[in-house]
Image (cartoon, rainbow, N blue to C red):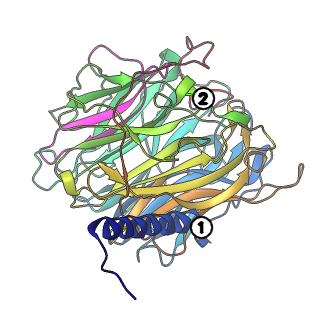
């Protein structure tokens, strides 16, 4: 005997079906994905930790992906033996890799160490650029950047272009180019760094010839003390640059409407509240920003304002159309139940041509499944989420790699280091994160930390979870006993 389903029964069955679908997606998201190693540290020089590769920066144009990273990380006094690169011209199917020539004494150059790679592409001049931070561990004055250039699609690289004046401790480099063909500043490439020796005073320098030469550096109005201020160009040519102030107290932004000749004073976006990760992980607050096709800038960073008692971090986001007015901070629903996770070190990218309510965002990050742990017990994993509606809703989490013990990574005076930032590319709308993956290591044996990508671009899961609106900050800087020393990403014993 059968009975007709009532509306209530039909609704219950529908709800059950949706629940099963969400559970299936969540179970699928917990599975790790197959990875392909794309590089390894080739150096054997003394003092460096070999074989280690950390801190990937990535840019993409069509099917070409270029990523750069540190090779042979030094434990003390910062920097690496060289910066390496890996390039794919077929959307990640195959890779060409190597070490950038003419940088350090280990690669035919004169600089003892380098750090903080940043990748850019200049569409007007068809040149790929990698900015490299010069590191002198003894405090010798340094030029802020050594810029490597490639004119064959990132497959081979020239000896670097350097520019002055010198600074006592130049720090965190970024570089980007205006690739908007309708912009009055099309072809401008903006280099950014800060002078940590003078309290993290930030500077910009502009190249109009594909990185061959750079104009004299300029400071934003008021000479702000900022850190990691990442420049992005809107379709109309305005530059919006977002970072943190020198004390990890606020997210800040400066803008330029004249092609980088001048920059405005700091605009405070919001204050920062964050929790240092357990286990001795190096976890600077370095915002990751990306721009959509309409010119809206999205900025993501780790923050504890949504975690009761500031006992862990999630990732949060704010957006702007002009660099001045910013949306309320929202929580990206990673670790949606919020019971144990600690999330940090984000890398954000947006699918080209998407914008507004159709902006397709991809976000990669490291996390602890259990945020209360120690050096031996902390398990570091790599995750990914996406949004197809400009961050209004987000997919379930995909675990890409892990679990990794912190002692498998090179150590610094600020903690074990997978990198201060990470990154990803999009290929035909599918994400391809580049990440440092550490293999098990016995104390005293060589490291085994190398750059990897998913063997196939990630397939996005459907958006399921809504972002959470801003809440009052419960415990700003609760675990920062002293914040009167500026952040230093690359000064002695730190970078």
Residue 31: give its label.
Answer: 1
Q: Position of residue 307 (x, y in %)?
A: 52, 31
Comes first in the chain, label 2 or label 1: 1
- Residue 246 within the segment the image draws in magenta: yes
Which quarter of the rendered picture does the N terminus lie within? Answer: bottom left
**Visible residue check, residue 124:** yes
Q: What is the CA distance from the residue labelled 2 to the residue labelled 1?
A: 27 Å
Q: Nearer the viewer, residue 166 or 437?
A: 437
Q: Secondary structure at mark 1?
A: loop
Disc 2 residue crowd, few under 14, some 14–19, many 20+, Cα 10 Å: many
Q: Is residue 19 left or right of residue 403?
A: left
**Visible residue check, residue 153:** no
Q: Is residue 1 left or right of residue 197?
A: left
Q: Nearer the viewer, residue 375 or 213?
A: 375
Q: Position of residue 93 (x, y in %)?
A: 48, 78
Q: Secondary structure at mark 2?
A: loop
Residue drawn at (12%, 48%) of the image = 183
Q: Give residue 298's quadrant in the image.
A: top left
Q: Which residues are magenta?
A: 221-250
Which residue bears the numbered disc 2?
311
Residue drawn at (15%, 43%) of the image = 237
Q: Give residue 469's quadrant in the image.
A: top left
Label count reads 2
């Amino acid at each position: 005997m059968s009975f007709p389903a009532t509306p209530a029964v039909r609704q219950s069955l529908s709800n059950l079906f949706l629940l099963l679908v969400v559970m299936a997606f969540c179970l699928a998201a917990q599975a790790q994905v197959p990875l392909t190693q794309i590089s390894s540290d080739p150096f054997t020089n003394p003092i460096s930790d070999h074989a280690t590769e950390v801190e990937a920066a990535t840019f993409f144009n069509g099917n070409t992906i270029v990523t750069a990273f540190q090779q042979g990380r030094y434990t003390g006094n910062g920097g690496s033996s060289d910066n390496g690169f890996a390039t794919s011209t077929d959307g990640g199917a195959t890779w060409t890799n190597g070490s950038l020539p003419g940088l350090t004494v280990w690669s035919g150059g004169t600089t003892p160490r380098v750090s903080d790679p940043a990748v850019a592409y200049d569409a007007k001049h068809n040149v790929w650029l990698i900015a490299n931070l010069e590191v002198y561990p003894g405090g010798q004055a340094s030029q802020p950047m050594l810029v490597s250039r490639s004119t064959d699609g990132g497959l081979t690289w020239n000896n670097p272009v350097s520019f002055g004046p010198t600074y006592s401790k130049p720090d965190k480099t970024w570089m980007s180019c205006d690739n908007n063909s309708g912009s009055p500043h099309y072809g401008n490439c903006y280099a950014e760094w800060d002078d940590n020796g003078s309290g993290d005073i930030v500077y910009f320098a502009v190249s109009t010839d594909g990185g061959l030469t750079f104009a004299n550096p300029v400071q934003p109005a008021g000479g702000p003390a900022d850190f990691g201020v990442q420049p992005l160009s809107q379709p109309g040519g305005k530059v919006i640059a977002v970072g943190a102030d020198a004390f990890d107290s606020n997210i800040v932004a400066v803008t330029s409407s004249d092609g980088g000749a001048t920059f405005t004073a700091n605009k405070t976006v919001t204050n920062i509240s964050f929790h240092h990760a357990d286990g001795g992980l190096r976890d600077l607050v370095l915002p990751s920003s990306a721009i959509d096709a309409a010119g809206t800038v999205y900025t993501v960073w780790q923050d504890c304002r949504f975690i009761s008692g500031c006992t862990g971090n999630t990732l949060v986001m704010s957006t702007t159309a002009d660099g001045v007015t910013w949306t309320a901070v929202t929580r990206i629903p990673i670790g949606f139940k919020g019971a144990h996770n600690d999330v940090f070190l984000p890398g954000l990218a947006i699918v080209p041509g998407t914008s507004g309510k159709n902006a397709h965002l991809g976000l990669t990050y490291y996390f602890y499944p259990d945020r209360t742990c120690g050096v031996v017990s902390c398990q570091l994993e790599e995750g990914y989420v996406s949004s197809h509606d400009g961050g209004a809703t987000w997919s379930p989490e995909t675990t890409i790699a892990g679990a990794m013990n912190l002692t498998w990574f090179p150590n610094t005076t600020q903690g074990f280091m997978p990198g201060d930032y990470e990154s990803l590319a999009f290929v035909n709308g599918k994400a391809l994160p580049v990440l440092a993956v550490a293999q098990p290591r016995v104390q005293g044996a060589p490291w085994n930390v190398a750059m990897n990508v998913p063997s196939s671009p990630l397939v996005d899961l459907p958006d399921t979870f809504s972002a959470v609106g801003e809440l009052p900050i419960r415990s700003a800087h609760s675990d920062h006993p002293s914040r009167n020393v500026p952040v230093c990403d690359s000064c002695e014993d730190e970078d």
